[in-house]
Amino acid sequence: MAKLDILHFPDKRLRTKAREINNIDDKLRSFIDDMFETMYEAPGIGLAATQVNFHHRVMVIDVSEEKDQPLCFINPVITHKEGVELMQEGCLSVPGFYEDVERAEAISVKALDKQGEPFELTTDGLLAVCIQHEIDHLDGKLFVDYLSPLKRNRIRKKLERMEKEFAAQKTRANSTL
Ligand code: GNR
Ligand code: NI
């Protein structure tokens, strides 16, 4: 098992459209285990492969209180949407920012599980929001895209500044080794 590095907005790689997966093998399953480890450690309730620079359609979610209900979706497709709902969202690729986003209130989604078995799920609430958020990642989309350009640019500038500060700190740490 290994913890993976998470890309941060405005990294261009987060804009990549992920490809369909047509081969579900042990190598992919081991990568999925790494995704779960990365998500639980973060901690987050979901993680899309795009966020860890793997541009294939796979995502993991666990919205349970006890963190004992792991869900894995391969090639997820939303087959039905109903209603609208506003929910405050955050994202591991946009650390420290939380904003209201409008999403479908209830959805049905079909996907393949880790064994390659097809399943379909109808849900609402946080799980429905999270599924829509993760599928957006696989399409190169982020929750900040739903905000005004003004808000999005403010977030981008703050994160760019933090990233620079972080890089400078790493350089200082290395030069004292
Ligand atoms: O951990 C996360 N919390 C969250 C809260 C509200 C709506 C969506 C999310 S997903 C996020 C983890 C993440 O960035 N997944 O891509
Ligand atoms: Ni996210």
Image: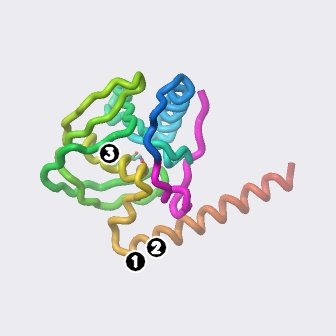
Judging depth in this view, the residue of 160 and 135 nearest the camera is 135
Membership of 148 in magenta stretch: no
Dot 2 falls on a residue whose secondary structure is helix
How far is the residue under mark 3 from the one under mark 2?
24 Å
Dot 3 falls on a residue whose secondary structure is helix
- Left or right placement of residue 74 versus residue 173 in this view: left
Q: Tell me: is circle 3 under 8 Å from ligand 1.
A: yes
Q: Which mark is residue 81?
A: none
**Magenta range:** 1-18
Q: Nearer the viewer, mark 3 or mark 2?
A: 3
Contact, CB < 8 Å: mark 1 with mark 2? yes
Tell me the amino acid under the disc marked 1: Leu
Q: Which residue is mark 1?
A: 150
Membership of 8 in magenta stretch: yes
Q: Of label 3 and label 2, which has the lower sequence position?
A: 3
User: Which quadrant of the structure image shows residue 58?
Assistant: top left
Q: Return the residue found at the far bottom.
A: 150
Q: Residue at x 59, y 36 (%)?
A: 3
Query: For the image shown, how many numbered marks are present on the structure?
Result: 3
Q: Which residue is mark 3?
A: 130
Q: Residue at x 60, y 68 (%)?
A: 161
Contact, CB < 8 Å: mark 3 with mark 2? no
Judging depth in this view, the residue of 104 and 108 nearest the camera is 108
Tell me the amino acid under the disc marked 2: Arg
Q: Residue at x 46, y 73 (%)?
A: 154
Q: Return the residue found at the far front.
A: 22
- Left or right placement of residue 89 versus residue 36 in this view: left
